[in-house]
Amino acid sequence: MDAVPIDGGVEHEGVVLWGLMGNVYRLINDRLRHDIADATGLDGSEFEFLLRLARFPDARGMATRVGETMGYSSAGTTKLVARLERKGLIERTRDPEDGRAYLVGLTEAGSEALRLGLEAHVPRLEEEVLAPLTPAQRRALQGILVSLDPTLRD
């Protein structure tokens, strides 16, 4: 691969776009995590796991599948599941179709934590992500982000 000169590299379109995405993510995510922690006592990854699990049918699924949607390794998912299980927010049960595997599901406490987190999360998203954009810009941004998400690629 050819070396990119520093003077041309700092203004490279990819470098600039990545920097903008990182800035927006950091600025908004810090406030979102604070809102969620204040409302639920959960850290960002714990809340995100509950949110993604809730999107599965009956809020139940393979922990590895949930972790994969978050970009987590098997070991990272195992640690996160153990924390959530200790907190009583999820429960593990044997998969009836594969007795060697486990499913995780939201408990009542997990559903309540998710509800409280969303009550804190959604207004911030409305204000800082949706309000500055027109409906057409929102649809375009969603399409762009889906295109960039490696977990959604075939």
Image (cartoon, grey):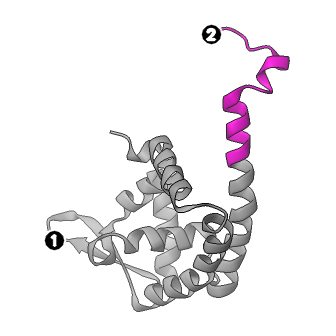
Q: Give coordinates of residue 122: x percent, y percent.
A: 58, 77
Looking at the picture, tell me which residue is in the foreground, 50 or 24. Answer: 24
What's the residue at 32%, 69% (across, down)? 56
**Most common secondary structure along the magenta stretch:** helix
Q: Mark 2 points at which residue?
A: 1
Crowding at dot 1, Cα within 10 Å, few <14 / some 14-19 / many 20+, comes out as few
Task: Based on the picture, tell me whether residue 4 belongs to the magenta stretch.
Answer: yes
Which quadrant holds residue 132? bottom right
Q: In this view, does 68 lie to the left or right of 19?
A: left
What's the residue at 53%, 58% (across, down)? 138
Q: What residue type is labelled 1?
A: Pro
Spot the residue most to the top.
Answer: 2
Task: Based on the picture, tell me whether residue 144 belongs to the magenta stretch.
Answer: no
Q: Is residue 8 left or right of residue 50?
A: right
Q: Distance between the residues labelled 2 and 1?
A: 51 Å
Q: What residue type is labelled 2?
A: Met
Q: Mark 1 points at which residue?
A: 96
Above or below 11: residue 97: below
Q: Give coordinates of residue 139: x percent, y percent.
A: 48, 55
What's the residue at 80%, 27% (across, down)? 10
Q: Please say if the residues under marks 2 and 1 sit with CB atoms less than 8 Å apart.
A: no
Q: Is residue 46 left or right of residue 81?
A: right
Which quadrant holds residue 105? bottom left
Looking at the picture, tell me which residue is in the foreground, 41 or 18. Answer: 18
> Which range is magenta?
1-21
Q: Is mark 1 on a helix, strand or loop?
A: loop
Q: Is mark 2 on a helix, strand or loop?
A: loop
